Image (cartoon, rainbow, N blue to C red):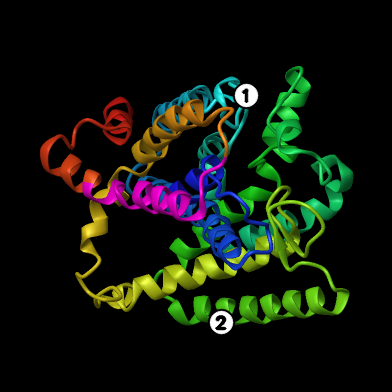
């Protein structure tokens, strides 16, 4: 997500949406948010399942565990909006719902989801896939970005939160539900592989449809088979498939007691995985400064924009390693653990 957000703030000069480099950047960005939400759903479901199995969780226990998460995620969303506010060349209004408020909704639903069977949650996923078709124009398919991140009153804010914002509950809870199924099927890789195969078949169908209808296969927004704003049914299926595929590849044989893919060679990424929320908020602080500097300035050349994007994306890996070595207690994740306990 760092890569796509950086590319949005420092877009190169003279590059169209049809450019191969733009397609690659959009592909990474299109996969980042689904992976982020799916893994968050997996983590919430794992924690809730273990708590429900170990203790008799009363309503007060659930509230004490979940409310700090809901409050912190909401406050972090507001902080992100302020850091990258439209008034300083950014992309958000200060009150804009986003991916962190989506995760706050997921946290609120956790006590319910942990009690539902996999079959019920699978049916709910199908409803999420169908929801863009049910919503129709209410999803804001022809809206501009700044219409999608603005709200004039409380009703519009709720609608942005639930069905026509950047990451509304409908249909983005699809990825949270997908994460819960991934956790439940941890020891059943064959079932997940069958799901991936079905998803790849569906992905192939979307490509064929794009060719036959002579329309773009994927665009951030506009007339295409896959659209991100709003998320189309085809986007949910395709991005969900590739999120599952990436998870399955990286998992290796770990689910059966073996080693993950490439063994310990990717262990240098573990510190980054421990502070994803902290990095998510912190990188917007950097981008807010960049957006303020770039406001009113011409776009950068392709090489310079590409270099800045790659450096800003990769620099968080060594920073996370240094953070875990010298100040691991200084993070939003540690704050959450402290208030939850």
Give 299 or 222, whichever is nearer the viewer. Answer: 299
Q: Is residue 293 located in the magenta-colored stretch of the structure?
A: no
Give 293 or 158, whichever is nearer the viewer. Answer: 293
Asked if one can make out residue 63 in the rendered structure from this viewpoint, the answer is no
Which residues lie in the magenta part? 299-318
Q: Earlier in the sequence, mark 2 or mark 1?
A: 1
Q: Residues within 10 Å of mark 2 (few under 14, many from 20)?
A: few
| Comparing labels 2 and 1, the label whose residue is closer to the camera | 1
In the image, is 206 to the left or to the right of 42? Answer: right
Give 54 or 13, whichever is nearer the viewer. Answer: 13
For the residue labelled by badge 1, is the local secondary structure a helix, a strand or a loop? loop
Residue at the spot of label 1: 93
Query: Residue 38: horizontal and vertical position, in percent?
Result: 51, 55
Whether residue 330 is situated above or below residue 300 in the rendered picture: above
Whether residue 134 is situated above or below residue 56 in the rendered picture: below
Residue at x-position 58% and y-position 76%: 195
Residue at x-position 56% and y-position 82%: 194
Whether residue 302 is situated above or below residue 266 in the rendered picture: above
Residue at x-position 74% and y-position 51%: 221
């Amino acid at each position: 997500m760092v890569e796509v957000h950086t590319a949005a703030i420092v877009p190169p000069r003279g590059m169209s949406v049809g450019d191969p480099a733009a397609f690659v950047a959009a592909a990474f960005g299109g996969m980042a948010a689904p992976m982020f939400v799916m893994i968050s759903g997996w983590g919430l479901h794992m924690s809730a399942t273990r708590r429900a199995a170990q203790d008799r969780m009363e309503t007060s226990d659930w509230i004490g565990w979940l409310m700090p998460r809901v409050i912190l995620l909401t406050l972090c969303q507001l902080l992100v909006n302020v850091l990258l506010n439209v008034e300083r060349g950014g992309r958000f209004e200060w009150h804009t719902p986003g991916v962190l408020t989506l995760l706050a909704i997921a946290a609120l639903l956790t006590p319910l989801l942990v009690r539902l069977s996999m079959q019920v949650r699978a049916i709910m996923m199908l409803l999420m896939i169908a929801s863009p078709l049910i919503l129709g124009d209410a999803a804001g398919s022809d809206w501009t970005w700044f219409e999608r991140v603005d709200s004039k009153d409380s009703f519009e804010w709720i609608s942005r939160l639930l069905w026509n914002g950047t990451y509304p509950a409908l249909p983005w809870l699809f990825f949270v539900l997908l994460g819960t199924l991934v956790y439940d099927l941890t020891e059943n890789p064959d079932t997940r592989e069958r799901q991936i195969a079905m998803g790849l078949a569906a992905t192939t169908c979307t490509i064929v449809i794009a060719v036959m209808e002579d329309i773009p296969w994927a665009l951030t927004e506009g007339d295409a088979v896959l659209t991100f704003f709003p998320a189309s049914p085809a986007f949910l299926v395709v991005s969900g498939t590739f999120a599952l595929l990436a998870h399955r590849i990286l998992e290796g044989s770990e689910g059966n007691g073996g080693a993950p893919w490439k063994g310990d060679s990717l262990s240098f990424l573990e510190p980054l995985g421990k502070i994803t929320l902290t990095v998510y908020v912190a990188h917007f602080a950097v981008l807010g400064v960049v957006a303020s500097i770039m406001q009113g300035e011409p776009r950068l050349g392709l090489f310079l924009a590409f270099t800045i994007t790659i450096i800003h994306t990769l620099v968080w890996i060594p920073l996370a390693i240094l953070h875990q070595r010298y100040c691991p207690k200084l993070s939003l994740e540690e704050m959450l653990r402290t208030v939850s306990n």
